[in-house]
Amino acid sequence: MKDITLTREDIVRLCERIEGAQTRAYAIPKLTDEYPAMTMDDGYAVQTALRQRFIAQGHKLVGWKAGLTSKAKMKQMGVEVPSIGFLTDKMAVPENSTISVSELVHPRVECEIAFVTSQDLEGPNCTAEQVLAATDYVLPAIEIIDSRFQKFSFDLQSVIADNGSSARFVGGGRPRYAADLDLRTLGVVMEKNGEIVEMGAGAAVMNNPAEAVAMLVNILHQLGETLPKGSFVMSGGITAAIAVAPGDYISARFQELGSVSVSFTA
Ligand code: OOG
Ligand code: MG
């Protein structure tokens, strides 16, 4: 990371601000309101400080997520560059469980294809072919995102610092070998309370979700990190994200991969 404008003190301050908003579920102004010169690298410096802080508190890193990898997501959020965030064991929730929205600010759900790797992957020139060769299996997932920024409104620098709005994730369905599937034509239908609210196919994510994972590995290289085997990686929302409220039941049905569901309560 080269383009750092924040001092070490600023990075720690912003990391603590994000941590407070994440763990106590309140909205804050986007970071660029106070630091207009902030760069993407500054955002990753804050995200890295947050990851190290959570790990020091005993959270376990289980994988990574790509974000803003589909046109639908980019259009919804007004941000045109993909980004990555980290995933820990504390964010994982079992399939079919109920999530309390009181632990979150303004949650939204996304349907994504997740990868589990069986070999280490490393940038800076990782390709989709290498990702597929290093993939143990793919499975369907729902990500619950929750921007800590007021009105779910942000820019790239701020959302990277906020760990790509990561909050919770649910994997499930029927894991399959990626080699047996065409991830581009794999369809998904998202239902909220039994009504279809979004639908799409894997190709919405960078023409192939494996491309998003390769992009993620290459960003990891810029952070001085690699993707160890056994990682759980989410490739990014295929459709726009859907807001959820207490009482909502979300189900994502994936062609070939079965379905994943999650409920919300107060
Ligand atoms: C940023 C996170 C995006 C995805 O799948 O595109 C993301 C946001 O929209 O808040 O997780
Ligand atoms: Mg996502």
Image: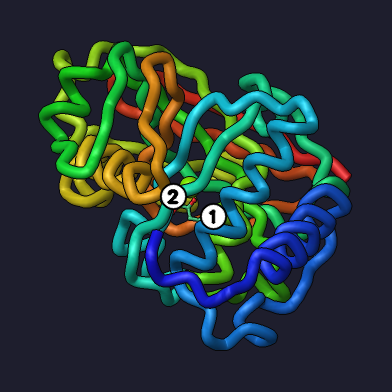
- Say which label, 1 or 2, has the lower sequence index: 2
x then y, percent, for residue 84: 44, 49
Amino acid bearing label 2: Ile
Q: Which residue corresponds to mark 1?
A: 164
- Please, which residue is most extreme toward the front here? 8
Task: In the rendered structure, find residue 84 and report the number of the disc placed on it.
Answer: 2
- Which of 168/52 is in front? 52
Q: Nearer the viewer, residue 261 or 147?
A: 147
Residue at the location (57% across, 39% down)? 194
Q: Report which quarter residue 83 is drawn in.
A: bottom left
Relative to 12, 23 lies left or right: right
The answer for how far apart the CA atoms under marks 1 and 2 are is 6 Å
User: Badge 1: how crowded within 10 Å, few (<14), some, or many (20+)?
Assistant: many
- Are the residues at dot 1 and dot 2 in contact (C-beta closer than 8 Å)? yes
* Residue depicted at x 69% and y 75%: 151
Q: Residue at x 16, y 18 (%)?
A: 133
